[in-house]
Amino acid sequence: MRAGTRWFAAGAAAGVLLGAGAFVVAAPVGADTSDPAAATHGDPVVAEFVDETAESGMRTVYDGGFTFFVGGGVATFDCDDDELPDVYVAGGQNPAGLYRNTSEPGGSLSFEPVDDEAAALSAVTGAYPLDVDSDGRVDLAVLRVGENRLLRGLGDCRFADATQQWALPVADDWTAAFSATWEPASTLPTVAVGNYLEVPPEGEVVRECATSYLVRPDPSGDSLGDPVPLQPGLCTLSVLFHDWDASGRSDLRMANDRHYYAEGSEQLWRVEANEAPSLYTEADGWRPMSIWGMGIAVADVAGDERPEVVLTSQGDNKLQTLDDESGAPSYADIAIRAGTTAHRPFMGDSTFPSTAWHPQWADVNNDGHVDLYLSKGNVDSQGDHAPDDPSNLMLGRGDGTFTESARDAGVVSVGLGRGAAVVDLNADGMLDLIEVNRSEVTRVWRNVGSGTAQEPATIGSWLALRLRQPAPNPDAVGAWVEVRTDDGTQRQQVLVGGGHASGRHGWLHWGLGTAAEADVRVTWPDGEQTGWQPVDANTFAVVDRGDARVEVVEPGG
């Protein structure tokens, strides 16, 4: 439970309804990314991480044969109302693991298993937390080889199977991707389910791509409706609803694995209210691109209101940015310029290409510049790809370029990495790391900043924010949040989906550099915008819609 609260008074909130494309960022973060030579920042400070897997209590192993070569996700969310993220880990052929976070604020990472029958599912590939029914308790979309499940949160880390109640379409699918958004006037979310291959009969191998689908709420508003096939199915491994063009509408990005089809590409679906979804085509400015698509992550690296997109793959990973002002989805790849291709292992003597899975943007050193984590690992024993393939931690310099720092940070992992979460597990303002590895226990690292396990020392200032609005969609999925200091303005969108089979719910983390305070502004999902609200650095703060005060909470009490 909350140990205590206090309030920051703010100026009058502005009730401004924004039109499409009217969202304005006060100032960009960093220099112009078009010229790497324009860097004004030196090498970033490296945060130190300590491997606490052995002592953490985390024991789940993601394992299994062919149908579990992909997936292996982890979900983080607060299921017992103490403001600390609890953890749900996919197990593949093993039961999934639900863990209560028992870490002391600022202390070592510790978890205890929760014996909950509804959550202890087998054949789980990943999970995404969201509040489906807007009751204030986090629910879980559980992805499986077989019938997917929607688990309704009951409180105290207990769940009930609500798949039939909410009418999630079920079939013997091989699911590894999920995303959700709230469309206007909807009481339930619109969800996208990404399916990989057709499930093979026992003892056989099927190499036909399965069909993914979009599901909107039933007109009654009490359950989900009939699924809409998203065809062609191109072996989808990640999906994400996000506002790619600052239009106020969230379209659906899909990352597809080209290994199983001769022709095809990554996909972007237009999802317009009250209309059937439609693919963007070359006639719309879309540029077809075929990769072994594994994961998606978005961040406004350039500070221009149009998020950059990371796509993980086998071989070189992509960093896409919109390359003109036409409003068309015409993306250019800037990964080489930014230093984020991560196409070979950064250590060892292997010359074979890497295999990257989960991408996540996160500021691990609190310098105000977003960093990029890529979980890596061979599919199984593919001889034409690196067998020892350490995950990447690339620190942002603030000029649109990045430097590899995993070895210096102490997070070198050469297992068969899959899903991951970069999240503050012990409420000390420093982002920690969970990574799922096939056939190994889930690994946990604690960020100790510039200190040690015995004496951690926080690097930089930080701010953790969470949004709250009246139902439906109390977590304000789709909202944009801006955080402004003297060094500029950073922005994030509240999203459900992306990554690789791994979802997060709860606190949005911001590094603030040396700032002692910041101003916060929210553009809510319907376009209404608050005024700037002041908040001290190094706090966990809840922004309540319609309230001119920011509530500060103390996790873990």
Image (tube, rainbow, N blue to C red):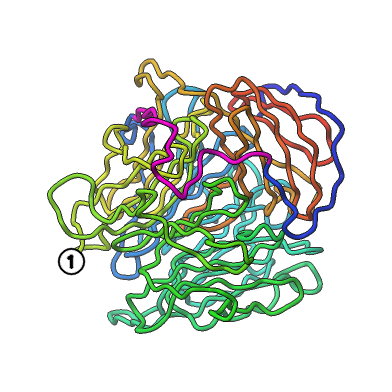
Q: What stretch is highlighted in magenta?
A: 26-49
Main SS type for the magenta part?
loop
Secondary structure beneath dot 1 equals: loop
Magenta stretch contains residue 66 = no
- View extreme (left): residue: 349
The mark tally for this picture is 1
Vertical placement of residue 341 versus 256, above or below:
above
Vertical placement of residue 244 versus 136, above or below:
below
Tell me if 370 is positioned left or right of 445 in this view.
right
Quarter of the picture holding the C terminus: top right
Vertical placement of residue 101 versus 556, above or below:
below
Q: Is residue 473 visible?
A: yes
Residue bearing the label numbered 1: 384
Asked which quadrant contains residue 316, the reply is bottom left
- View extreme (top): residue: 455
Tell me if 544 is positioned left or right of 212 in this view.
right
Which residue occupies 69% across, 80% down? 276
Which residue occupies 70% across, 75% down? 225
Which residue occupies 42% across, 72% down? 289
Whole-percent x, y for residue 228 in the image: 63, 80
Whole-percent x, y for residue 366 in the image: 49, 30
Q: How crowded is mark 1: few (under 14 residues within 10 Å), some or many (20 or more)?
A: few
Whole-percent x, y for residue 105 in the image: 52, 23
Amino acid type of the residue tagged 1 in the rendering: Asp
Viewer-proximal residue among 350 and 164: 350
Tell me if 114 is positioned left or right of 50 in this view.
right
Asked which quadrant contains residue 344, the reply is bottom left
Q: Can residue 96 be seen in this view?
A: no
Viewer-proximal residue among 513 and 381: 513
Quarter of the picture holding the N terminus: top right
Whole-percent x, y for residue 473 in the image: 74, 53
